[in-house]
Image (spheres, rainbow, N blue to C red):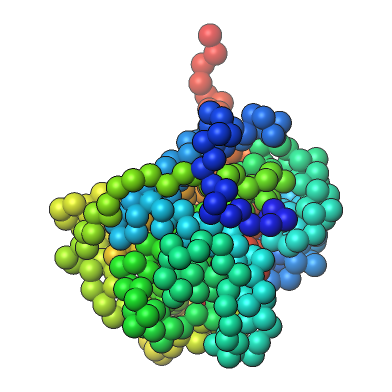
Amino acid sequence: MADRPIEVSEVGDVAAGPRMPFDYAAPSADPIREDLVIAHRRAWDRISEAGTWWNGRERVAIAAEARAAEYCSLCRRRREALSPFSEEGDHDDVSGDVLPPAAIDAVHRIITDPTRLTSAWVESMVEMGVPKTHYVELVSVVVSIRSIDAFHNAMGLEPERLPTPRDGEPSRRKPDSAVEGEAWVPMLPAGRLRGEESDLWGMQTGNVIRALSLVPDAVRWLKELSAAHYLDMKAMPDFTRGRGPLSRAQTELIAGRVSAMNECFY
Amino acid sequence: MLRASIETEGAEVDYRGIADAASAEESTLPGAGALVGFVEASLSTDREAAIVARERVRRELGDEALVDAAAVIGNFERMTRIADATGIPLDAPVSVMTESIRAELGIDEFGRADDRAPLKGWQRWLGRMLDPAFRIGMRWLGRRERAKSAPSSSKPTV
């Protein structure tokens, strides 16, 4: 990752000129696929625009905090503590008063100590002014920028400058069929969906896709990024084909090692 | 996923490299040592190690493979956090079919694994019964796909 996080005040510097984001031809001679460029640019658009529950300025602030968490001294102390809830203090945040403190805390914890999150903590977010709808959208922004930054880091590229927030109001649309009970957040049923959510998946899907379905656009974004970074959802069940020159087994070895290093049970 | 993909290649399942990075070098999977080294260096703060790891992937597997591998790292930095942040349970069929592998790889020692609903006796039995069928099915699938993609020797030449 970069030596320091990018400040919100630095993002979207229009004076920097008309350079398109993710212009990989300049800093890298590597054959970075066009679908990666498109997916990353689309992600930058999504971050900068109003979402379902957060506006563009808040979404860019969430992205900036996701980067800042890497360098946060409170997060570092918490990671070393026996309990992640024993250390009190303020995060080394970069977004000023754009986000409520509970949202900043959520972003930092998801980046730096995700395996020790709990159901009770997610419930406490609600009490501190971050409803589960907002929490799910926050998760989608955090994990999206994390994945793009991780790609850059792996390739030895600097992180892309964050986008300029755009005006607009969140749509505030909650799917009627989301139900509580299976996870810490409500999810849509695993089977075939009808109506406006019918495009999210086919006959059936796994919990990791359903996880963000309280905010349907977050699932659409997840599908876009996964198709470029890994495999299209339709290609996933075909274990005979990998991506590009990597066999499927080599691809899954990378996936398995990343998951193991992150101590992810899933 | 790793198991299924290796089974379709018709090889013995070799998990070395996931839980035990040091033995990735001995894995029968081509490039396993380079790929696991690349993952570890990419998730560390050691820039020198990252440069060395990238060069090894380039040398052993090529520039395109380096890009694809970096993208997969990005993907699973995302997916693992989605699972951890939302408290989703492991899907029941996966839980049944992976019980022995999870124990073998130490995945059940990870923090949130305790949240997983314990398998019932009949589910364990079902998993054991289905395991050989799964293996045979995956290998059959792999052979079928390889036969499909192989050039036909009976095709007349012009």
- Quarter of the image that includes the N terminus of chain A: bottom right
Tell me where residue A46 appears, x and y as whole percent: 40, 47
Mark count: 0
**From this viewpoint, is residue A44 visible?**
yes
Tell me where residue B69 appears, x and y as whole percent: 64, 48
**Can you say whether B72 is above or below A95 in the image?**
above
Residue sitting at x 34%, y 55%: A55
In this orientation, which residue lies closer to the viewer: A206 or A82?
A82
Residue sitting at x 43%, y 62%: A98
Residue sitting at x 34%, y 67%: A134
**Can you say whether A153 is above or below B115 in the image?**
above
Residue B36, image quadrant: bottom right
In this orientation, which residue lies closer to the viewer: A264 or B11?
A264
Tell me where residue A12 appears, x and y as whole percent: 51, 42
**From this viewpoint, is residue A142 visible?**
no
Q: State left or right for residue A151 relative to residue A40.
A: right
Residue sitting at x 56%, y 67%: A93
Q: State left or right for residue A176 relative to residue B87.
A: left
